[in-house]
Each structure stands twice: as C-alpha cells, then as structure tokens.
C-alpha cells in the first residue's frame, strides 16, 4: 500500500500516522510519499497557489514512490493531493479527506481547485470521508465509506490534580482564532489562571496579536510548537481546552483533549465541524453563541464556575461519546469494508480481509 500525504498540519500528520499503524497491524506493508515542496515552498503564501503547489509536488512524489515500490493500491490522505493525479492512478486509489474543496475552498479564486477536485474524486475507486456530513455530499454513492480518524490513547490521567488553566492550539493564528482566544481569556479569566498557547512561536503569535490590536496578558504562557507527546501531556494536565477557530474541519486537537479529560470551551466554527454537535450535547453553555471574543468569554466564565462534580460528570459523558473514535473501531472498518473494496481484483490478501 502506498500512502500519499501532504503532512502539512499536526492533525493530518497524526491521522496519517494512525492510518499507517492500523494498516501495518492488519498485515500490509506500507510505503509513504510526501514532499517538502523544494524551492516552491517559498511560493506557498496564499490559496489557490498553496493547493496547486502541494498537488503538483505530491503528484511527482507519488510517481517516484510508485516506481520504487510498485504498490497494489494507493491511499491519498486529502482531496487536494489528487487533483493532478491521472485517471489510471485514481482508479486503484482511495481518497481520504476531512473536507472537500467544495466545503473549505470557497470564493472565485478557488473555483479551479473545486473543479479539479470534483473531477479527481469522481475517478477514485473509493472515497473515505472522515465524517457523515462530508459523506452526505456523495449520497447514494457506493464508493463512500465513512472512516473517522481514531484518537490514540493519551498519557495517564489524574483528574483530581488538574491545573486550573486552559490551552489553545494556534498553529494558524488567524484560522484558529488566536486573537479571539486571548481576548476572551483576558476578559473572563483571573490573572492566576494561565492560558497555554501551543503550535506557534511566541514572537509570531505576539506579532499577530499586535496587528489585531489584542494585548497578551501576564497569564498567557507561550509554549511554542510541541511534539505530540508533550501536547497530550498538557491536555491531560489542565482543566480546559479553549478553541476559537474561525474555521475548522475535524478538530483532532479538541477530540484528543476530550479523551484526555479536558473540558472543551469553543466557538461555533465555520466549516464541516461535527465536533460541535458533540460539544453541544456535553454542555451547550460551553459553545459560544457566535464567533467572537465576547461570546467566547461568556463560555469561559461558565467553565470556570463549574463545580468539581459537574466537571467529573462532563468527563464521564465525553468518554462515552468518544467511544466510536477508538483504534479498534478504525481497524474493524479498514478490515471489513475498506481493504476488500480497495484491493478487489488485485489478488491481495490481508489478515483482516482474508
């Protein structure tokens, strides 16, 4: 099996790593193809140029990897990665995606990306959306299998000794709403409660806040980019996960936080965000009425006023609702539905589909 991946965000890297782990556990040999984009990486400054460079670089990476490994089938880990792939490749490929360009590449500038993506998805052997919402776009298409990305187990939890603090992932500060999160925390949280900012260098984050006219208070702690283990340790240690994304696709960081026992405080991000349904089911007062600092501050105050018993009940219900996101469920879907359909006709046998 060949996995072609952009690996451009922590969420995508985590999802790809989980897919490789599961495929290997099911008895397949997996090769990976990606790209550092070479000299073109300096031109990745705005859409649609970012997508065009990514797609062209991944086509070249896929060709090189296919010559080297002669795979029986290919999995592309985003819809963008497929747009320059030939039909002969797509006919023996699955495309896994958290969102299609039709839902997250809006505006006239991105129209060519949407057209190219529709064409490539129509040629693929199998479509593997992460969510039911994305699957509904292809209603009635027998090629569709919803394949939610599993959440790896986190470090051991000690909920009784959690720090009265929150963390906020801000890898893309505008998209992730760093200014909204910092302003809301400054308005609602006491100075003794830290907000840990991850995923961004302090100087870059501070410069972004200055441009937005937002001041970072003394209780803002800049962690910089963290490796996955360190990030999970943080979400296991603090009480709250603060999410202020203006746009979100899947919300892996928030899902990990829920599994780690953090209480999720969020805005109603634009985009295909099935996590919002889960967040509202847990506590609607922790989901802001709009995407703004003032609305989010109301939710922060509510979170800080929750009793220990209320937080414990929240964590118990969160674990129950997160049960479909286990590795066991992911492997079962791969074994029983994805691999038989993808490998049909090539004579491949796996421990999960033989």
Image (cartoon, helix red, strand yellow):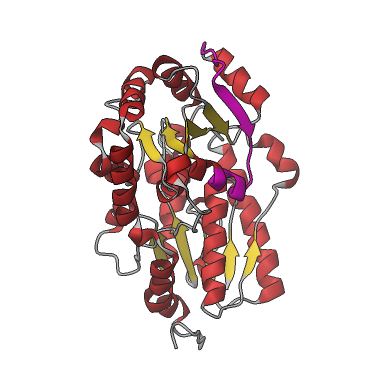
The reply to whether residue 297 is in sight is yes
User: Measured along the vertical axis of the image, is residue 309 above or below residue 142?
Assistant: above
Residue 51 shown left or right of residue 330 in the figure: right
Q: Please name the residue shown 28% across and 45% down the image.
A: 313
Task: Report the number of numbered marks.
Answer: 0
Residue 202 shown left or right of residue 95 in the figure: right
The reply to whether residue 125 is in sight is no
Residue 244: percent from left, percent from top = 42, 30
Q: Please name the residue shown 30% across and 33% down the image.
A: 307
Q: Nearer the viewer, residue 289 or 242?
A: 242
Magenta-drawn stretch contains 86: no
Q: Which residues are magenta?
A: 213-233
- Name the outermost residue toward the right: 39
Please tell me in which quadrant of the rendered image residue 302 appears.
top left
Please tell me in which quadrant of the rendered image residue 125 appears.
bottom left
User: Measured along the vertical axis of the image, is residue 262 above or below residue 143?
Assistant: above
Residue 310: percent from left, percent from top = 28, 38
Q: Nearer the viewer, residue 13 or 261?
A: 261
Magenta-drawn stretch contains 224: yes
Residue 179 shown left or right of residue 297 in the figure: right
Residue 293: percent from left, percent from top = 39, 19
The quadrant of the rendering that contains the C terminus is bottom left
Residue 84 shown left or right of residue 42 in the figure: left
Please tell me in which quadrant of the rendered image residue 129 appears.
bottom left
Q: Please name the residue shown 68% across and 75% down the image.
A: 69
User: Measured along the vertical axis of the image, is residue 56 above or below residue 181?
Assistant: below
User: Measured along the vertical axis of the image, is residue 207 above or below residue 89?
Assistant: above
The quadrant of the rendering that contains the N terminus is bottom right
Residue 341: percent from left, percent from top = 40, 77
Q: Please name the residue shown 38% across and 39% down the image.
A: 263
């Amino acid at each position: 099996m060949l996995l072609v991946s952009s690996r451009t965000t922590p969420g995508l890297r985590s999802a790809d790593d989980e897919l490789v782990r599961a495929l290997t556990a099911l008895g397949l040999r997996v090769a990976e193809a990606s790209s550092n984009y070479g000299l073109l990486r300096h031109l990745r400054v705005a859409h649609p140029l970012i997508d065009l460079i990514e797609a062209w670089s991944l086509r070249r990476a896929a060709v090189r990897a296919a010559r080297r490994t002669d795979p029986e089938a290919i999995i592309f880990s985003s819809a963008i990665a497929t747009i320059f792939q030939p039909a002969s490749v797509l006919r023996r490929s699955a495309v896994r995606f958290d969102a299609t360009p039709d839902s997250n590449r809006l505006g006239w500038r991105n129209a060519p990306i949407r057209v190219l993506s529709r064409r490539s998805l129509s040629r693929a052997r199998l479509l593997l959306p992460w969510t039911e919402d994305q699957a509904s776009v292809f209603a009635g298409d027998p090629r569709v299998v919803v394949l939610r990305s599993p959440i790896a187990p986190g470090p051991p939890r000690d909920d009784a000794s959690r720090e009265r603090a929150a963390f906020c992932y801000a890898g893309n500060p505008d998209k992730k709403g760093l200014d909204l999160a910092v302003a809301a925390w400054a308005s609602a949280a006491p100075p003794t409660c830290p907000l840990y900012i991850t995923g961004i260098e302090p100087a870059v984050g501070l410069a972004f806040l200055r441009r937005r006219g937002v001041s970072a208070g003394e209780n803002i702690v800049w962690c910089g980019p963290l490796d996955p283990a360190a990030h999970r340790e943080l979400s296991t240690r603090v009480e709250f996960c603060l999410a202020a994304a203006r746009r979100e696709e899947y919300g892996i960081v928030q899902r990990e936080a829920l599994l780690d026992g953090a209480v999720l405080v969020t805005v109603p991000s634009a985009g295909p965000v099935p996590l919002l349904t889960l967040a509202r089911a847990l506590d609607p007062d922790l989901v802001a009425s709009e995407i703004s600092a003032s609305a989010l501050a109301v939710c922060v105050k509510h979170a800080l006023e929750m009793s220990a018993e209320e937080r414990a009940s929240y964590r118990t219900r969160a674990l129950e609702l997160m049960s479909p996101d286990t590795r066991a469920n992911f492997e079962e879907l791969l074994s029983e539905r994805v691999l038989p359909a993808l490998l049909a006709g090539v004579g491949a046998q796996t421990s999960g589909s033989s």
